[in-house]
Amino acid sequence: MLNKPLLLGWVWILTASSAPVLSSGNPVLQGAHVHGEAVLNVVQEGTTVYIEFESPAINLVGFEHAPINPEQKAALSNARQILAATDRLFQFGATQCLLESKEINVPYPGQSAHKHPHRHEHESAQEAHHEHADFQASYTFQCEQASDLRAISTTLFSLFPGIQTIKAQWISQGRQGSTSLTPSDATLRLN
């Protein structure tokens, strides 16, 4: 069974082997925090499908700073709930896939329990203006007839309208590739 560190290794290999694509003027993964863009990495090994998703917080909740009011705290909580509802996020076509595990990392996780507002010494208005925060989620699915898996569709665009493009990379059955998903084409084809 493939584990998370190995998944990251596969993604690194995919990225390194995609260097000609990256330098061709059509970047697949910039590795930078870009508003409007998100990243999706998919690795299939046997009957297991691993999916990693990363996005700037502004794409999902509309801000990139510690929440300053109840509405922003609710937005963080809502985004986490959406990312946890995998049956809404990913469709595997005719292939039956069941969630085995998930890990959702939300920026500012302790904010909802924080009772009194205060500023730390290192915080300033200028630092807050340039702050960046990302959501990260990883999922492990077990799929029946995984060898028949040809595509994965996502509803991330409709659930998070701040996402304009998803830079996707995949490894499946000895093949690999990369593409950009958009609201009008939100299906990752594994061929």
Image (cartoon, rainbow, N blue to C red):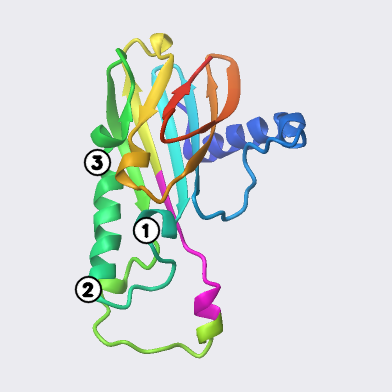
Q: Which residue is mark 1?
A: 106
Q: What residue range appears in magenta? A: 127-137
Of residues 121 and 68, the one nearer the viewer is 68
Q: Could you tell me which residue is drawn at 32 percent across and 40 percent down? A: 158
Q: Amino acid at mark 3?
A: Ala
CA separation in Å, label 3 and label 1: 15 Å
Residue 14's image quarter?
top right
Labels 2 and 3 touching (C-beta < 8 A):
no
Residue 108 image position (x, y, % from top left): 37, 68
Front position among marks 1 and 2: 2
Identify the image quadrant of residue 27.
Answer: top right
Residue in the picture at 55% in, 79% down:
127
Q: Residue at x 55, y 82 (%)?
A: 126
Q: How far apart are the two marked residues, 2 and 3, measured between alpha carbons?
A: 23 Å
Q: Earlier in the sequence, mark 1 or mark 2?
A: 2
Per the image, label 1 sits on a secondary structure element best described as loop
Question: What residue sits 76% from the left and 33% below the top?
Answer: 24
Look at the numbered disc 2 and give the secondary structure of its residue. helix
Q: Are marks 1 and 2 in contact (CB under 8 Å)?
A: no
The amino acid at mark 2 is Pro
Circle on res. 85: 3
